[in-house]
Amino acid sequence: DDENKRLRLLNMLQPLAQEVDCAVSYQGGLKALLQRHYDAVVLDMTLPTFDISEEDDGGRPQALGGRELLRQMKRRRMKSPVVVVTQFDQFGERRDAMTRQQLDTELRSHHGDIYAGLVFYDSTTEGCKEQLSALLSEAFAARDKNGSENINS
């Protein structure tokens, strides 16, 4: 949902991956996941519904679009490890509001077989890069050890 964040994340991923695909919306991400198997998914939590273009504003922003993509992955039995990246502390509204910690707990509970963890994105620090690298390394090690069957035992 943020061009600067996307470019910075792509830069962080360059040393970790031979190839990186980028989708910029919920629909774009779902389409990419349906078309190809990925070794790992780095997923923003807040996403526009559709790709933003000169003709389209992206539709309604989805504060928990990343959670919905995880549900779609589970429904389709996709096993790629997922690291969620977010720059927000709060998600949802009113009764449905939750903190970043509550979201992490929920994702771990419902998607523990593929959910590798949550990284707080802060453009002013390098901690995000280190945490992202560590979570991806742990997810790959768990996948390799367990034959892709269970990421978080």
Image: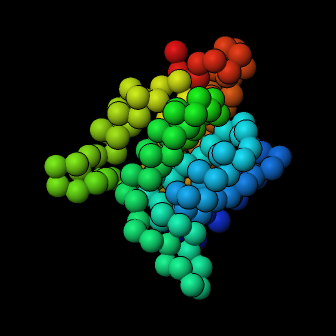
Quadrant in the picture for residue 130? top right
Q: Nearer the viewer, residue 102 or 119?
A: 102
Q: Is residue 62 left or right of residue 94?
A: right
Please give left or right for residue 25 compared with residue 65 in the image.
Answer: right
- Residue nearer the viewer, 13 or 80: 80
Where residue 20 appears, x then y in whole percent? Answer: 75, 52
Is residue 134 in view? Answer: no
State the residue at coordinates (23%, 50%): 97
Specify whether 141 is left or right of 153. right
- Residue displayed at 51% across by 46% down: 69
Asked whether residue 36 is in view, the answer is yes
Q: Nearer the viewer, residue 8 or 49?
A: 49
Residue for point 48% across, 65% down: 48
* Residue 84 locus on image (x, y percent): 51, 44
- Please say which color scheme the image uses: rainbow
* Extreme residue in the left direction: 95
Give the vertical position of 67 relative to 44 (above or below): above
